[in-house]
Image (spheres, rainbow, N blue to C red):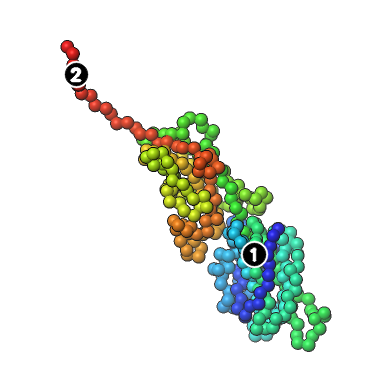
Amino acid sequence: MKLILRTARVGLGLMLLFSTLTTLGQTGTAQISKPPVSVGPFTAVDNAGRTTALGSNLVPAYENTNTILFFNPNAPGSGLTLVASTKEDHPTRIGADALAFTSYKWFYMGQNPASPTATALGSIPALGLDQPSNKLQVQGLTEGYHVFKVQGFILPAGADASAICPPDKEETYVVYVLPRLKVDITREAGGTTPLQYCETEAATQTKVQMRVATSFETPGVLPAVASFELKYTWYAVKADAAGNFPTIDATKVNLTGATKVKEVVVPASATDPNIFAPTIADIGKYKFFVEVEHTLKSRTYDGADADAVTNRKRAYTLYRGWYAGTDQASSPVIIVTPAPGKPHITIEAIQD
């Protein structure tokens, strides 16, 4: 697995984050449960020692959102900064009596929270109280769970570092990177009739039905894709009078020429959400595609307009499938045919 981890000097500001995982061979109360995943620090969110150590720098809402990351395929990729408290959480040295750490040792524990394996990232030399080495920058995270651990050390002035007391406690922290989705759309029930329906049948037609199959781009990522709630957004692309279709940007940035026709959350829909039947009554030729995204973390979490036409926010978190094709060009055309009005009769010529 490719990870980039680096320590950085920081001031006394800290920003630890809030939650718990119960599958690390320790006891505790899970705090950030985002079905189907659990993430965050080992210590329970309402632990008095944790709250005291972090003080006003603890921002639960920020932590709650950012223990779940989008998979970012761009350099430097998905990442975050983990920050350990500058002072200890000790059972008897409480409040003003708590001591400041002088150095830290970080560990990467792998991607299996149920069976973490420590990989030391190295002990960081003491930098002095004004710039404690309590910050770890992480980049290039792959999909799925990632488990980290930190130990804090205290070396009094004049003490021998080789005989320093080992940490009595340590903190484990878990984050999750949302896996990329792979979307395939086929014709429901293997239909072989023409891909068309009459305009008057639109509201209830079953001649053209599409079935979505969603999987992970990377096999083996846990939990399984069926455990996640997803959002499907269906789009129609209509040909012009000459039969030409506007090109939809393959980078998923610009959707000019596509019309949103339906949104459904999977598996919350009461009907089968994986089946889509167009109900467009406007006669013409169409192509259809669907964009699928995780609902576990919204692209609007920072308040930005996630669907601006010319600059869709985090478009790389949207996964597209064209109906029965690998792209727009190979996707077949669906025709909505007119229901002819009645003709009228008159006389042009006679012979009698």
Image position of 184 with respect to 36: above or below: above
Q: Residue tagged by mark 1?
A: 139
The residue that appears at 42% across and 41% down in the rendered structure is 244
Res 340 quadrant in image: top left
**Residue sitting nearer the eye, 15 or 269:** 15
Confirm whether residue 84 shows in the render. Answer: no
Image-based side of 249 in relation to 101, left or right: left
Q: Amino acid at mark 1?
A: Gln
Image-based side of 303 in relation to 339, left or right: right
Image position of 174 with respect to 217: above or below: below
Circle 1 Cα neighbour tier, 10 Å, few/some/many (<14 / 14–19 / ≥20):
some
The residue that appears at 56% across and 46% down in the rendered structure is 183
Rendered-image quadrant of the N terminus: bottom right
Q: Secondary structure at mark 1?
A: strand
Q: Secondary structure at mark 2?
A: loop
Marks 2 & 1, CB-CB < 8 Å contact: no
Image-based side of 76 in relation to 338, left or right: right
